[in-house]
Amino acid sequence: MTPQQSTITEVCGGVDTHQDTHTAAVIDHVGRVLGTECFPATPAGYTALLTWMRAFGPLMLVGVEGTGAYGAGLARLLRNEHVVVVEVDRPGRKTRRFQGKSDPIDAIAAAKAALAADRTGIPEQRDGRIEALRNLRVARRSAVDQRADAQRQIKTLIVTAPDDLRQRLRALPVKELINLCAGLQPDRADAASPATAAKIALRSLARRHQQLTQEINDLNELLDPLVAAINPGLVAANGVGTDVAGQLLVTAGQNHDRIVSEAAFAMLCGAAPIPASSGKTHRHRLNRGGDRQANAALYRVVLCRLRWDPRTRAYMERRTKEGLSKKEIIRCLKRYIARELYRIIITANDQDLAA
């Protein structure tokens, strides 16, 4: 449809984002569809999309799917143009089953969800030091995962290696094992021999392990001062180091004010129990949502404090006497720690704003 200027005072937009194209829809203040259009996912396309939406009338807000992925560029432009942007969830399966699935339908659904404030949120700002921290952590986590895979493959090869090689390697600590395998000198001309092939494979994996270790160390040299500069109080908290602090900072995002309370932060980290009551039954169930990496970071803090912090150990003993299992106590501790660390994150952010 061609945009037509009318007596409409305010309109709302919705965008279904994809890698190459974005489909936009505009509705009025009562939810009537005014138009849909497809635009390329390029800076010029983002500008054309915004111009097209504004031709229908004053733009209240725009609901965008995937502001942290395909919609990141569009969300950045809209924010720079002082347009209110909200992130909307994709339509549920039940909704899609009844109304069908297409890009215009999803764009209209995004606009209606934004207008009704139905399961919407403030998108993270993809700029500043937190975004730099996130990028570095992506590379480090990938290197850590690949190094662990290489180590597992080395030990698997040792299990099936010839007896003399297996007896020589199986009892070595990891560091000595990697150094020894990296220094093997097999005869490449005899690669058809299982014993020689095993040595070649072990040497290749061990050298890959060493390269990844060096890569991780290089990234740590960048991450340690960056995290300490962003929030030194968080790094100094009991049981929190650079890795845990970095993950929690990335989870909270550059614009911390979008997290309205410590309960919202706990829910974001998957550390808040979910009500599951009905009738005379009143209970809560385990929250398996949220950012699982942040949840794992809180878990590591709990394990550290259970070993070294007298107050946490006393809490464990008291709750154990009350009949709670270890898993239940750890879940309670994660909730308390989320509350404590949220305050540190927000306090540091307030100080930055004041400065």
Image (cartoon, grey):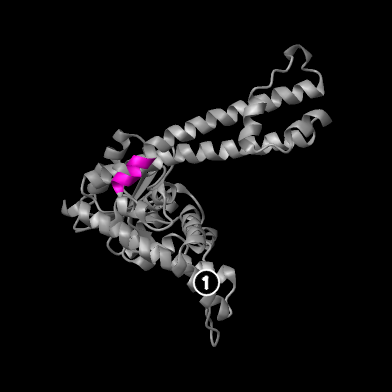
Residue closest to the eye, 237 or 130 = 237
Q: Residue furthest bottom?
A: 280
Q: Which of 249 and 287 is in front in this view?
A: 249
Give the image location of residue 60, x and y in percent.
24, 56
Residue 73, above or below 109: above
Extreme residue toward the right, this view: 163
Q: Magenta span has 107?
A: no
Q: Which residue is drawn at 20% across and 49% down?
A: 82
Residue 226 lies in the magenta stretch: yes
Quadrant of the rendered structure where residue 199 is? Answer: top right
Nearer to us in this view, 142 or 96: 142
Percent position (x, y) of residue 355? 16, 51
- Residue ID at (31%, 63%): 343
Res. 144 visible in picture: yes
Amino acid under label 1? Met
Q: How crowded is mark 1: few (under 14 residues within 10 Å), some or many (20 or more)?
A: some
Q: Image height check: is 37 above or below 265? A: above
Which residue has dot 1 on it? 316
State how many labels appear.
Answer: 1
Name the outermost residue toward the top.
Answer: 189
Secondary structure of the residue carrying tag 1 is helix
Residue range of the region highlighted in magenta in the rendering: 224-230
Q: Is the magenta stretch mostly helix, strand or loop?
A: helix
Q: Tell me: 277 left or right of 352.
A: right
Residue 286 relative to residue 131: left or right: right
Q: Position of residue 30 (x, y in %)?
A: 30, 64
Could you tell me if residue 273 is visible in this image? no
Work out whether 85 lies above or below 80.
below
Judge left or right: residue 111 versus residue 53.
right
Residue 349, image x, y percentages:
26, 54
**Horizontal side, residue 114 vs residue 303: left or right:** left
